[in-house]
Amino acid sequence: MTVPAPGADGPSLRPRTAEHYSVAPVLDSPEGYVAPGMPGVPVTGYDPDTPAVPRRTPRRRTALALLLAPLAALLGGLAYGCAPLRAADSLGWLTIAQAGLVALPLGLLGGRNRLLPPLGALLSAGALLLGQLTQRLRIVHSDAPTPHGLLHDTLSSWRADLRPLDLAFYTIALIGGFLLTRRTANRS
């Protein structure tokens, strides 16, 4: 007796049953094909023949920073001192701008040198002092001359006019100079 071949009478309406193999069947795939995620898959964008270009670190010019920062403090102090005299009471807040002006060359050119933030703080406070002394010099010079001399009159006028708010401005100059120098160094 012969057994008819499956599907000889036509296509079967039953779903196909799973076929189990002891070895994976050979699929129709192109020669050298490796499935994604499998070992042996080539990495895209990798060219082993070209050497990797080393990343250039920014060159630190600490000597140039140490030259430009006192010049920035001098410029900031003179700009503060030469402001109109009628705005003298509101000028103390400009110490933040002076600290930023000093911090730019120190942070950008000097880099992360740990001696530069304290230097930025001292130069910012020095710029504020220079600005206040320049302002007092202008006031004393506009008054009648005295026999003591211009420098002595300027310093005594400055000492006599010190207020508690000036201590706050010097504190702002010190903290602002330190932090702004450190932050500009971290960004470069």
Image: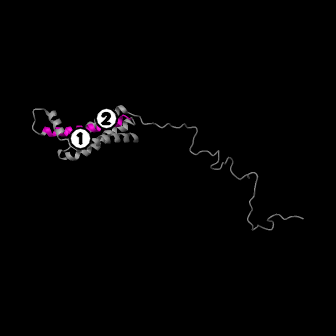
Is residue 33 left or right of 14 when viewed as pictured?
Answer: left
Q: Say which quadrant the N terminus sits in.
A: bottom right
Q: Nearer the viewer, residue 52 or 164?
A: 164
Tag 2 and tag 1, C-beta contact below 8 Å: no
Pinpoint residue 166: horizontal percent, then vertical percent: 23, 43
Q: Say which quadrant the C terminus sits in.
A: top left
Pinpoint residue 8: horizontal percent, then vertical percent: 81, 66
User: For the point 26% across and 46% down, which residue is it?
Assistant: 93
Pinpoint residue 181: horizontal percent, then vertical percent: 35, 39
Instruction: Please state the extent of the stretch shown in magenta in the rendering.
Output: 114-141
Which mark, residue 103? none
Is residue 109 left or right of 35 when viewed as pictured?
Answer: left
Which mark, residue 68? 2
Is residue 121 left or right of 20 when viewed as pictured?
Answer: left
Say which quarter of the image contains residue 145.
Answer: top left
Pinpoint residue 68: horizontal percent, then vertical percent: 31, 35
* Residue 26 magenta: no
Q: Residue furthest top?
A: 63
Asked whether residue 173 is in view, the answer is: yes
Say which quarter of the image contains residue 12.
Answer: bottom right
First of labels 2, 1 by sequence position: 2
Task: Describe the element under mark 2 as helix, strand or loop.
Answer: helix
Q: Nearer the viewer, residue 140 or 168?
A: 168
Which mark, residue 79? 1
**What's the residue type where badge 2 is placed?**
Leu
Q: CA distance from mark 2 to mark 1?
A: 16 Å
Task: Describe the element under mark 1 as helix, strand or loop.
Answer: helix
**What's the residue type where badge 1 is placed?**
Ala
